[in-house]
Image (cartoon, rainbow, N blue to C red):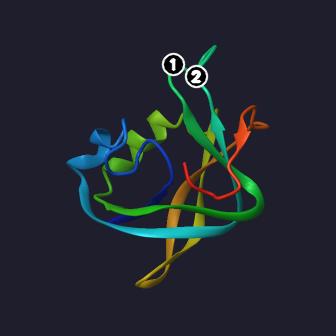
Amino acid sequence: MEAVFVYGTLKRGERNHPLVADHLLRAVPGYVEGFALYHLPPGGERPYAYPAMVPGEGRVFGEVLFLQEEALPLLDALEEEGVEYRRVRVRVRTAEGEVEAWTYLYLEEPQGVLLPEGVW
């Protein structure tokens, strides 16, 4: 089982969640500290809007998805791991306590709108 912190299109009910839905064991709301969240609008190479999380001040809210291990390669492909995003470990605070999880950090300088409330 792998824990993955998601904060945008992979959250339950969002456009990319079906990619991992069949691998989902459970989901828990949570947040990370020490990161900033941006809204990247559609345009150019982006066919639809999505968020970018980068190191910074603040909190980012999302969900910890507990997934079967075979879901990680699917996520790496979606996130263009190593090109657009980098998969890293973070500490997520949840109502069940702290959880260590994978997440995807945006590798470029975000060209979008800062979301100071940390919710996309």
Please say if 107 is above or below 5: above
Determine the secondary structure under disc 2: loop
First in sequence, mark 1 or 2: give its number: 2
Classify mark 2: residues with Cα within 10 Å, few (<14), some (14-19) or many (20+): few
Please say if 96 is above or below 75: below
Which quadrant of the structure image shows residue 66? Answer: bottom left
Figure label count = 2
Residue placed furthest toward the front: 117
* Type of the residue with mark 2: Pro
Residue 63 coordinates in the image, percent (x, y): 43, 62
Q: Residue at the spot x=58%, y=64% of the render?
A: 89
Classify mark 1: residues with Cα within 10 Å, few (<14), some (14-19) or many (20+): few
Please give left or right for residue 87 compared with residue 108 in the image. left
* Type of the residue with mark 1: Pro
Nearer to the camera, 58 or 75: 58
Task: Point out the image quarter for the N terminus.
Answer: bottom left
Residue placed furthest toward the left: 22
Q: Residue at the spot x=57%, y=21% of the render?
A: 46
Q: Residue at the spot x=72%, y=34% of the render?
A: 112
Q: Residue at the spot x=33%, y=43% of the render?
A: 17
Residue 21 coordinates in the image, percent (x, y): 25, 48
Please say if 114 is above or below 84: below
Please give left or right for residue 32 compared with residue 94 in the image. right
In the rendered structure, are the residues bearing label 1 and label 2 in contact, judged by CB atoms less than 8 Å apart? Answer: yes
The residue that label 1 is drawn on is 47
Please give left or right for residue 21 compared with residue 43 in the image. left
The residue that label 2 is drawn on is 42
Nearer to the camera, 61 or 67: 61
